[in-house]
Image (cartoon, rainbow, N blue to C red):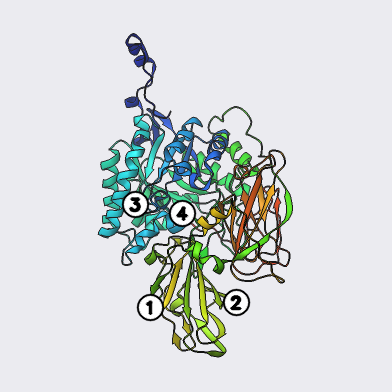
Amino acid sequence: MAPKKPPCLPSLLLPLLTLLLPQADTRSFIVDRENDRFLLDGAPFRYVSGSLHYFRVPRVLWADRLLKMRMSGLNAVQFYVPWNYHEPEPGVYNFNGSRDLTAFLNEASIADLLVILRPGPYICAEWEMGGLPAWLLQKPEIQLRTSDPDFLAAVDSWFKVLLPKLYPWLYHNGGNIISIQVENEYGSYKACDFTYMRHLAGLFRALLGDRILLFTTDGPEGLKCGSLQGLYTTVDFGPADNMTEIFALLRKYEPHGPLVNSEYYTGWLDYWGQNHSTRSISAVTKGLENMLKLGASVNMYMFHGGTNFGYWNGADEKGRFLPITTSYDYDAPISEAGDPTPKLFALRNVISKFQEIPLGPLPPPSPKMMLGPLTLHLDGYLLSFLDILCPHGPIRSILPMTFEAVKQDHGFMLYRTYLTHTVSEPTQLWVPNNGVHDRAYVMVDGVFQGVLERNMKHQLFLMGKMGAKLDILLENMGRLSFGSNSSDFKGLLEPPVLGQTALNQWLMFPLKVDKLVKWWFPLPLLRSSHAQAPSGPTFYSTTFSILGEGGDTFLFLPGWTKGQVWINGFNLGRYWTRQGPQQTLYVPRPLLFSRGALNKITLLELENVPSEPQIQFLDRPILNSTLHKTYIYSLSADTQSPSEPMELSGH
């Protein structure tokens, strides 16, 4: 039950009310080490939980997703709190709208779900920079996730805002939070700084008290550096891993108490350019049943994945830079669109063998809508809107500066210089030390020349007259959320070299693309006319209406290359049709105006536009189509992708 102030009642009724209401001080969630179990209010308890991230689901859909989780037999929900989602600038906090953490806790309470909270400060979660704010990198030498005084000062300041908000929601205070994780898979990080972990544990205790259960989570290989005396040790692994061996290893660090798998993987994440990941229903259900037979508490990661709207996706570094797709469907029991899948019903059957399932059917799939094809119209080249995109004008520097140095956290920045001599033959343009972070769109006098890409494409050949304008649009594809390099600076990290000449004297335009799109939305603009399909960064848009109430839908962009999409001013996320596997973007029904009202869609196409600039809205997603392969993703597919081995950790 959510904490509430008691109503004002006549004094004669107060003694009776005191007898009838459960008292907060009788509420407890503790570890019973003698009997290897949890106790909830003194009674044996085991949680069967699922992960859902409020920051990946529109607020108006929180209640729907949580209800479906409860009706699936879960008694708890586990979720992260991304620091960068709530503190966009140092000392500036946002807990409004989709960031209203208290509202989400209340929705979980209404759904009768306990809460397992993971506030970081680092969360991974395949989220931009693992939840750490990009502004930390304005101090280039900062050592993230260590006892570096600069990092600890920022962490302390943040937690002194966040944790007091959580305090009333702790279970023993009348709320629904039964346990809180300290850091996240810290044993997988290179630092192994116990001073840092002890500092966090002390900070949590100071701000939350001694009664809340604090725990750590690590993959089997991370238990050595990730666990800490005084914090309950839990592990994470998937259905393909050896449960017996991993739980035996866990017992070396936590000899007594309940076994806990804090991340039991129901699916897996997707990278651009690789296959859509799936995990078979039979493997996932068998693994869950085996753990429940042991009396273990289990959290399924993910139970509902959601969407990396806007620029919020993270990235991995596994030999090369691997950005995460916009879809975070995860092959989870509840699909990206919030629909129950065959995997959900199979897991529900397993759970019903061990604990009571709420009565009543699960809500049916949401209505879906098809529309189109719709023809988009050219609004103009990105370079034509620099005055609006960068109203304060460019920043001048001899050497190119990073996104972080100019306080541009996300999106795009344009770098401009002028050729100091004529280049009459095709001449190599390259950036030393893999210094393009992450993707560069190169233009000479406004003519698109091609792309440079981190780890993948290192050179272009250019020509131009002396004084020609060289523009390089840099895209931040998402900072590393897991991998070897923790400080993932964006932009041009080194001066580009043309032939033998290092280019200098740069103008840098931090672009406010989202603000421009929102200004466009209510205003009719003059259309540009072009005889042939343009190339390079270009804006396209159109309007459309929906008869009736409409429904959820999936935006399909056949023939488009790569870019960003906005619907009614909302940043839907990245598309990369040519790369795959994701071919459609989930469009939740609440983003659309129905009953004949006009909707506006805007695309920023970064490379090449199809000869017929059309889009469609489909009634089902296409999540597994890479290059020339085209597969319609089926929620009933009971297969495992052979090319994507299961990783033990990375969340």
Please name the residue that numbered disc 2 is placed on.
447
Distance from Cα at disc 2 to Cα at disc 4:
41 Å
- Can you tell which quarter of the image residue 640 is in? bottom right
Say above or below: 435 vs 113: below
Give x and y (percent) for residue 137. 36, 63
Q: Residue 651: give its label.
A: 4
Q: Which residue is at the front of the view, 2 or 10?
A: 10
Does label 2 or label 3 sit earlier along the sequence?
Answer: 3
In the structure shown, which secondary structural element does the residue marked by tag 1 occupy?
Answer: loop
Give x and y (percent) for residue 245. 46, 52
Please name the residue that numbered disc 1 is placed on.
398
Crowd tier of the residue under label 2, counting other residues whose Cα lies within 10 Å: few below 14, some 14–19, many 20 or above: some
Please name the residue that numbered disc 3 is placed on.
227
Q: Which residue is at the front of the view, 106 or 277?
A: 106
Q: Number of numbered discs present? A: 4
In the structure shown, which secondary structural element does the residue marked by tag 4 occupy?
Answer: loop
Q: Which amino acid does label 3 sit on?
A: Ser
Tell me, yes or no, if residue 141 can be seen here: yes
Distance from Cα at disc 1 to Cα at disc 4:
39 Å
- Can you tell which quarter of the image residue 502 is in? bottom left
In the structure shown, which secondary structural element does the residue marked by tag 3 occupy?
Answer: loop
